[in-house]
Amino acid sequence: MIKHIYKLLILACSIALVTSCDMDVYPVDGLTQGQIEGSAEGAEYATSGNYSMLKDVLEFQGSVYSANSYIRHFMQMSEFPGDNTTLSGRTSDPLYEASCYKHNPTLSNVAYLWFIAYKMLYGVNVVIDAVPDGASIDQDQLKGENYFLRAMVNFDLSRFFSRPYAQGRENKGIVLRLSSKITETARSTVGEVYDAMVSDLENAARLMTKERGNGYASRAAAYGLLSRVHLYMGANDKAIAAADEALKLRGIGNLEPTANFPSYFSRTLESSETLFAIGHTTIDSRGQSSIGSMYLNDGTGWGEVYASFPYLELLGILPHDVRHQFIMPQYLDKNPNTRGKAIYYEVYNAMTDTYDEASIDVTYNVTTAKYEYYDNGVKSVETDDKGFYYIMLNGAKQKALLTSKMEDRYGFSKYYVNKFSYQDGDPMLNSPVILRLAEVVLNRAEAYAKKGDAASLQKALDDVNTIRKRAGLSGKELFATDNMRGYDSVLEIVMDERRLELAFEGHRAFDVYRNNMPLDRRFPGVHPGVIMQPNHPRVIYYIPEIETSTSGIPQNE
């Protein structure tokens, strides 16, 4: 019997899909394997349609909703469960459930992502099945790109719907589709899914020899994603080898220079740092339905999700870091000449889950090079070994953000994020990055840190310092074996650097849970202030009810 996923994939055969760049419209859903075989044009059109499904708004369950796109749901479902963002209020958008771990099997964003993912898998399998190896350089390139897309989509599905690889290869994985001819629906194991991804990325790297632009897969992108997959699997030597291959093809010298980095996310399709991005053009700008709309209000946008208190604390210990420019604090005093360096503090007490702001004057003492505030006399603001700011409040140390008085929404200070904005000057337009060189360097750093020998630990710190130097840091702001800046291990350093560099790009929660670490979500926001353990059932999402009720595959706990 043909099961539910297969039925979904053959629906809507007349929907027109547009390419990931500025090309013509092709009715690629109507192309069969027979039409693609022996036709370079057919394979190219079908491949363009497969890329397009990553960004387009398609009909689902009889309606078209402007916020329904694979990449929007992916970015929200992956980032909002972490600890880098704060949702400032209740919203009817199912992103609320992602932020608060209030999962259920009927969530519309989860169902749409599942539907489009398997629709894409069917599309890429049609091309892979139809195009023989060695037909031509162009045909090999297209087949390799579809192998890459298959691995990427399976990776996304696996991270959302199955336990982290480190928790066991034999756990229930996703429904693995490796051919357009397969109709049986059953869940493979996590190990089988990861093995298939490795094989696909190796095939992708073998077949691709061309660079078609950042909106298309390439050999460097295949090795970059392979380094991430091996890292998730705990295969450290293989992760290092794959990262090395990616960096041979697109060297560290292609990292954005420090001066240009603050504008990088508005230029991802042009930058040599990008290995793969979901290409958007001006016609793809969706205003309040865009990814950036939740992070920013600049004439349009909701501006309801902000950089979190703990992320701002971590960034705040590095005042010279250019990554501050990805955060847009909304100060009440718009005049920087009168605002002052710091006239305000914000304190969050994780033990009591309370959040306080106070307008006690905080000033910078040039003579002592310290911030000071008044509380029954002059008190210096203290810092710990890592550089986090503390004040003495009610006789106890409290972490504090030093800032000017902020605009707020429901009491939560507005720290806008601009990583999904300002492409072509449009505050709601961006081509979201899936892979970039900085991540590959940090993948390698993490793998070196886990190897643990002295030489590997030094190489891990070298890679971290490469990223910190690009961020404008120098001197004692860099790490050395005799300057750990208060950290207990090199792995802890790498994890915090990944957090600083890759914030809001969909990595943080995955990075914590795949390392079997707890995630401390006791910070201001509408979410429950709890510590999420890596074995908690809601670390992953429920499989959509529309699938389990039809095909009968087992539901997640």
Image (cartoon, rainbow, N blue to C red):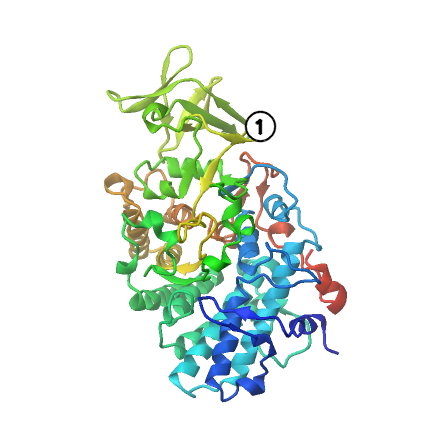
Q: Of 529 and 494, which appears nearest the observer? A: 529
Q: Of 513 and 30, which appears nearest the observer? A: 30
Vertical position of residue 234 compared to residue 310: above or below: below
Tell me the quarter of the picture where residue 28 sits: bottom right
Q: Position of residue 210 (x, y in %)?
A: 36, 75
Q: Residues within 10 Å of mark 1 (few under 14, many from 20)?
A: few
Left or right, 272 with respect to 159, comes to: left
The residue under the point 44% across, 66% down is 21
Left or right, 378 with respect to 286, comes to: left
Quadrant placement of the N terminus = bottom right
The residue under the point 41% across, 10% down is 376
Q: Position of residue 396 (x, y in %)?
A: 47, 21
Vertical position of residue 144 compared to residue 228: above or below: below
Q: Of 471 and 274, which appears nearest the observer? A: 274
Tell me the quarter of the picture where residue 158 sits: bottom right
Tell me the quarter of the picture where residue 113 sits: bottom right
Quadrant placement of the C terminus = bottom right
Mark 1 residue element: loop
Q: Position of residue 254 (x, y in %)?
A: 28, 60
**Residue type, numbered disc 1:** Thr
Name the residue beneath numbered marker 1. Answer: 352
Q: Residue furthest top?
A: 376
Left or right, 174 with respect to 441, comes to: right
Vertical position of residue 379 compared to residue 491: above or below: above
Answer yes or no: is residue 34 visible.
yes
Left or right, 246 with respect to 81, comes to: left
Vertical position of residue 340 compared to residue 9: above or below: above
Q: Position of residue 100 (x, y in %)?
A: 62, 43
Answer yes or no: is residue 170 visible.
no
